[in-house]
Image: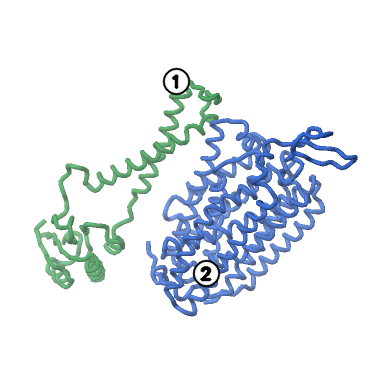
Chain colours: A blue, B green
Amino acid sequence: MEFKFEGRLKLVTQVLMAVGVVALVGGFLTDTSDHHNRWWANLLINGFFYFSMALAALFFYALQYATESGWSAVLKRWFEALWGFLPWGAAVIVVVLLAGKFHAHHLYHWMDHTLYHEYMVEHGDHVHYVDEMEEGAVLNPNFDHVIAGKKAYFSDAFFWIRTLVYIATFLLFARMFRKWSLLEDEAPSLDLHYKQYKRGAVFLVVFAVFSSTLSWDWIMSIDTHWFSTLFGWYVFSGMWVSFMIFTNVSMLWLRSQGYFKEVNESHMHDLGKWMFAISMLWSYLWLSQFLLIWYSNIPEEVTYYMSRVLGDYKVPFLAMFFVNFAVPFYVLLARDAKRNPRFVIPVAILIFIAHFVDVYLLIVPGTMFDHNQFGFFEVGMFLGFLGLFMNRTFATLAKAPLISKNHPMLQESMELHY
Amino acid sequence: MSKIFHVMYDDDAVLMTAAKDLVGQGVRVKDVFSPFPVHGIDPVIGIKRTRLAICSFMFAMTGTSLALLGMWYFMISDWPMNIGGKPSFSLIENVMAFIPVTFEFSVLCGAHGMAITYLLRNGTLPGMPATNPDPRTTDDKFVMEITTDNNSMSSDELESAIRGTDMIELSIKDA
């Protein structure tokens, strides 16, 4: 069966995208923050949030192959559909990083090259920065000892090579998996399956490293002085759970429209279990990071949480954690609740928004400090990107049959019974 | 005279087919004894879903409450402690430090409570007398128990229905 991307769904995504365009233009014109930081920060937040969901779909797909999982074979095409947004999200992130590089905004403090040199020599109105004391040089008031120590990691060449390698790797793997998956439909072959299995395992290894380092490079580096070794896992669990929520709700909707008839109640139960379990993983990692920093109370570490737990962001930060942990835990714990859309859908929508707030609070306190504004612009951007994300996902979904034909574990998946 | 039938099968798939067959003829199966869980047999013979998970949740919540209560008493009320400069004398400000212990204690109570409830409910605590009709059901045989007491059929009708399945042994006892 083929999915047709048309009618109300297409209209809804287009309306959302139009809202996004209005927010994008209107937001830029009305943005009074320094360097339009508010506008750029929101571009990064939304670009990253939706990109990471598409990325989590790629990861989950590779995970299913690497673990030889049978249950998810009928959902395979849905995961592939989510990759439709990967290039778009990557483009947004690259634009934000490039704009930072050329000082159009000041989200990344470390992109200021004056921080890295201890001395400076003034020649009239031109300032020349040097590392060693020399004739006529004075101390550079902008010099930042901590950031200068990270000079090698943040050097232009290394940073851009990393960023481009992440994106290229993800796009290449997605393209390869998709190509083989479509090929399998036409020519049944176990070789293809084993190729996917092997590349899936390779991808997991690559992803394990890249998901950590990309979250340091793109997100953690905003709070340049601060670091947390758990950060990569934390961001990764966040992207995984957002992806699971989106999958669960979309699958409920698609089934109600008569698509994906092969996806039965047990699959929905399993998706609910994933949503529940990864919510717990996320909460566990949130707590692990917070608990250690709170307990040891070292100034260089607690700065991150000072603004989030004691400062302006106290209410959304703690409310976000409460919602993301307690709501899925207490509501979705029971078996029957996971199988009942009347429980799943409200919880899913609530924690989807709360996970967006999580990404928002990864970025905003380090870029807007205590002059943050929240208004129609933020909401419009969220909705606009949601529209684009859905538009790309469903358009990609319509490009191939919904159920792959020759997956060796397809029968097992269709007969899934818990 | 009420009778108890113990029907033995040597394969779980055969047992499933037989159970479906008998239930289809209106026979009510009282219980099945098997060396391992037979998936899908519960709804066939009309066994209600277990409420053990609800029990476990309640045990775990008891654990959570006890742990927090204990920590409040030990660390805040009875002998206030200040460790590493943390503001003391307040449960809410210190609760972060108590979360790992609370979590562990909840798991401990949930798991032990569930295991003990399970063993008690099944009568399988160590030292309790075995209730399975044939010791071979702990090895590689499956026994279905059917009684005339909870069936409206006569014992002859039941017996002929039972003999129609692919069984290997039948023992009939007076209840």
Image location of residue A7, percent across then percent down: 64, 73
Mark 2 lies on residue: A77
Mark 1 lies on residue: B78
Between A190 and A344, the residue placed more toward the observer is: A190
Is A224 placed above or below B36 here?
above
Q: Can you tell which of label 1 and label 2 is closer to the viewer?
A: 2
The C terminus of chain A appears in which quarter of the rendering? bottom left
Q: Most extreme residue toward the bottom, as rendered?
A: A186
Between B25 and A236, the residue placed more toward the observer is: A236
The residue drawn where x is 52% and y is 29% is: B94
Mark 2 closeness class: few <14, some 14–19, many ≥20 residues within 10 Å: many
Judging from the image, what secondary structure is the residue with disc 2 in?
helix
Measure how far apart labels 1 and 2 are at the Cα level. 60 Å
The residue drawn where x is 49% and y is 79% is: A186
Image location of residue A385, percent across then percent down: 67, 59
Q: Which mark is residue A310?
A: none
Residue A239 in view in this figure: yes
Q: Most extreme residue toward the top, as rendered?
A: B79
Image location of residue A346, percent across then percent down: 55, 54
Q: Name the residue type under label 2.
A: Arg
